[in-house]
Image (cartoon, rainbow, N blue to C red):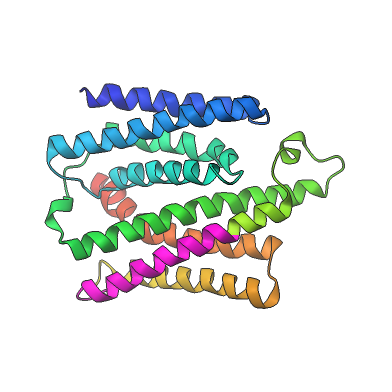
Amino acid sequence: MNLDLLALFTICAYLGTSASLIKGFCQQKSRYKTVYFTWLAVIMHFTYIGLFFLQSNHFNFSLFNTASLISALVAFLLLLASLSKPVEKLGIIIFPLAAIMLGLDMIYPDKHQALQHYNWQMNTHIFSSIIAFSLLNIAALQALFLALQEKQLRCHPPKKFILNLPALQTMESLLFQMISVGLLFLSASLITGMLFIDDLFTQHLVHKTILSIIAWLIFSALLIGRTRYGWRGQTAVKFTLSGFILLLLAYFGSKLVLEIILNRI
């Protein structure tokens, strides 16, 4: 199978889904048609990743390849969540990003850092990190929607888009559920890193370790504050976005500098 052709079909499916959400997500029938079409896009995205792995006999963790995998996983987790929770509207942001990441991965392939070079302990650490980042990525987007919804509800009258979102309490409940699960995987990532990596504070890992620990503390503090002090609203949004930005820098900061910026100097 031609991988470039498969990637192009996948990108078109993501963009078509995004256009459908933007145009008519408020209609119940349109919602289900959109979700089914998105499943096709996500399946094709994972097929692309799997076929690339088989053809090259490895999976690499370069910047765009990792971003493509994470975007596919984020889209998949969003679809799973949408089966029981009204979160499909987050796809307005997630699906176009998945299309962009897949396109960049197709245009700028990298043949380094093969997965087969790692043992199962490192693979456990890497994939728990990726799942944690993916879940907290969705939580960050949920926080943005929550901030926008809270701001618009103060306006008179609020915009129609906001009226189509779930109730504010439902949005907050979903946010904290996503953070709780994401924090669980982030904890697993840190624990496996401490157990299986000889020195987490070596030069090339120290910033990832410190930023990830700070992010873990922020998300933990948010959940404790929610339980003990009833933190919600803008406080929850600020904590969530702060923690996610730290993880973003931890996961992609060094890759961006080493693979894109320094490689072009």
Residue 113 visible? The answer is no
| Residue 172, position as x, y percentages in the image | 66, 57
Image coordinates for residue 3, horizontal then vertical, percent: 24, 27
Is residue 114 toward the left or the right of residue 163 in the image? left
Outermost residue toward the front in this view: 84
Residue 41 appears left or right of 122: right
Magenta-colored span: 176-200
Q: Residue at x 57, y 39 (%)?
A: 88
* Vertical placement of residue 210 versus 153, above or below: below
Give how far across and how far down residue 155 sits, in percent: 83, 45
Position of residue 232 in the picture relative to residue 241 (left or right): right
At a point 45% along the width and 29% down the height, the residue shown is: 14
Query: At 34% from the left edge and 23% from the top edge, which residue is drawn?
Result: 8
> Position of 151 compared to 39: left or right?
right
Residue located at (56% from left, 29% from top): 32
Answer whether residue 3 is visible to the viewer in this image. Answer: yes
Q: Residue 57 magenta-drawn?
A: no
